[in-house]
Amino acid sequence: MTMDHPFKEEIGKMKDWLVEIRRKIHMHPELGFEEVETSKLVSEWLEPFGLQVKRGIAKTGVVGLLQGSEPGRTVAIRADMDALPLDEANQVPYVSKVKGKMHACGHDAHVAILLGVAKYFSSIKDPLKGNIKWIFQPAEEGGGGGRVMVEEGVLENPKVDAIFGAHVFPLLPIGKVGIYEREGLAATDRVVIKIIGKGGHAASPHLTKDPIFAAGHLITQIHSIVSRNINPLDSAVITIGKIGGGTAFNIIPDEVDLLGTVRSLNPQVREALKLRIEQVIQGVVCSFGLDYHYDFEYGYPVLINDSEMSKLVVTACSRGIGKENVEVLKPSMGGEDFAYYLEKVPGSFFRLGCRNEEKGIIHPYHSSLFNIDEEVLPFGVEMFVRIIDQYLGLNMI
Ligand SMILES: [Zn+2]
Ligand SMILES: [Zn+2]
């Protein structure tokens, strides 16, 4: 049987404060590696809690450390701080004040939740066994701020033994947690393809090498890779998202450019896709007597949770909300740079339901109408406190 613990009451009292923080950040969104004001605010909020605060890691990253009075393990928790380049369409009093920028992925909530965890642990009178590290990173949305944070040593001094990160999740209702047992999110690589032909008059195609015609065949053929070359029990996506070439109806251009994303959930599939795409380009383009240029640009790696750490998340969260409110999720073919931390230390990335149909909070990530049910703020604090308690063996709860 679960009962309301004083700690839950304590977190409940924080709600207005958490909402204020989230809205303040929401109104002043900043893009990746430009989170100057956000990072300043984070430091100012952290310092009174008695944490050791370091700024300027990976440009705008902030790290806070609470060193326990008793020896123990070091656990890290992470929030991303960046917003996205779009105009907000929500009509709320705390709408983005910056044209062309919006917190449409909920990173404002992640920052507020981690600050709530800091506030909670700073208020604990009992001695802390072990250390807690707070990682506020820049540039999750494509900039790979997580990779830079790792390169700049955030997992050292003291060495992090385990790391946990959460993302608000509009597909799950408020009050629920989603967990990936192992693979959670995909490797997100880019392919850059140039088909090089020979332009000329549209009425004399026989005197040209038409790259637009070849591009049509290539796009069709490239989609055979996932269906014919990848094991159906593995997952892969190839999407050509951009194509460009030509200037007029009566000109055959010299070149066509194609840009695409390639997603996979394990390194073998990732390498197979890289190789097979080039073989298909070569085969198709050469059959038309054209030439090509191909780049496969590695993006974020696959996010792979440590299964023991995921079990710990399930146990810790279930204690608060019941097993029925913790859902095991299938992996998503989206990407997440939390993967870089998980390449170095065991940990788990989980989801916090933020959907509320009654309040009309139903829009997906990166939508100009994205929003969260702010109940997720104290809820997220509670889940992190439970996970930390469990990992460090504090037995506070
Ligand atoms: Zn996003
Ligand atoms: Zn995000």
Image (cartoon, grey):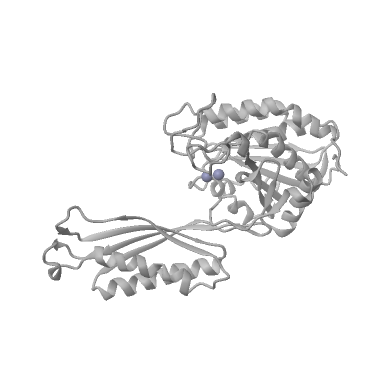
Question: Which residue appears at 41% of the width and 68% of the height?
Answer: 277
Residue 338 in view (yes/no): yes
Question: Which residue appears at 75% of the width and 32% of the height?
Answer: 120
Question: Which residue appears at 33% of the width and 72% of the height?
Answer: 282
Residue 140 in view (yes/no): no
Percent position of residue 288, x then y: 25, 73
**Number of numbered callouts drawn:** 0
Residue 331 versus residue 220 in the image, above or below: above
Q: Ligand 2: give its quadrant.
A: top right
Q: Is residue 161 left or right of residue 337?
A: right
Percent position of residue 333, x then y: 54, 57
Q: Is residue 368 left or right of residue 259?
A: right
Quarter holding the N terminus?
top right
Percent position of residue 95, x then y: 51, 27
The quarter of the displayed image where residue 343 is located: bottom right
Q: Nearer the viewer, residue 177 or 97?
A: 177
In the current view of this chain or complex, which residue is farthest to the front? 358
Question: Which residue appears at 52% of the width and 38% of the height?
Answer: 104
Percent position of residue 244, x then y: 29, 55
Residue 44 versus residue 371 in the image, above or below: above
